[in-house]
Amino acid sequence: MIENRCDCKPQNLKIVNKAREKMPDYRDISDLSDFFKIMGDSTRLQLLIALQTGEFCVSDLSYLLNMTRSAISHQLKALRVSKLVKTRKDGKTVYYSLDDDHIREILEKSIEHIQEK
């Protein structure tokens, strides 16, 4: 067990221990932090929201967001490396889509949360 460096005593040790049992491994927390950093960029978030509609090629995403293909490609690479989007090639054209339904659900719940009034 790790020595506790806190300079206070818990008021409710039972709930502290319950939370400690449910706390993910630090590596998982670090990965989750990286996940939110990737999703925290407004351009990448716009791309993810657009991809909820379906597959897009870089040109269509560029037109939609009024950005250069180079800028869109750069952001899509970060999303692909982070396993938030996947690709499908049709001839010379690469199509991007959300990697799985978890990403879609996270986006839907997040938007629902911020739109609560």
Image (cartoon, grey):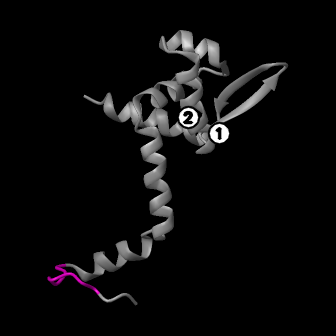
Q: State the residue at coordinates (29%, 75%).
A: 15
In this view, the residue in front, 91 or 35, is 91
**Circle 1 residues within 10 Å: few <14, some 14–19, many ≥20:** few
Task: Find residue 103 and report its image quarter.
Answer: top right
Q: Which residues are magenta?
A: 4-11
Above or below 14: residue 62: above
Magenta segment includes 7: yes
In this view, the residue in front, 100 or 93, is 93
Q: Main secondary structure of the magenta part?
A: loop
Residue occupied by mark 2:
104
Above or below 3: residue 52: above
Q: Amino acid at mark 2?
A: Arg
Residue 65 screen position, x and y as percent: 49, 14
Residue 23 screen position, x and y as percent: 42, 70
Mark 1 and 2 residues: CB-CB less than 8 Å, in contact?
yes
Q: Amino acid at mark 1?
A: Asp
Label 1 and label 2: CA atoms lie apart by 7 Å
Task: Find residue 51 and report its image quarter.
Answer: top right
Q: State the residue at coordinates (60%, 26%).
A: 73
In this view, the residue in front, 45 or 23, is 45
Residue occupied by mark 1:
100
In this view, the residue in front, 86 or 111, is 86
As helix, strand or loop, the secondary structure at mark 1 comes to loop
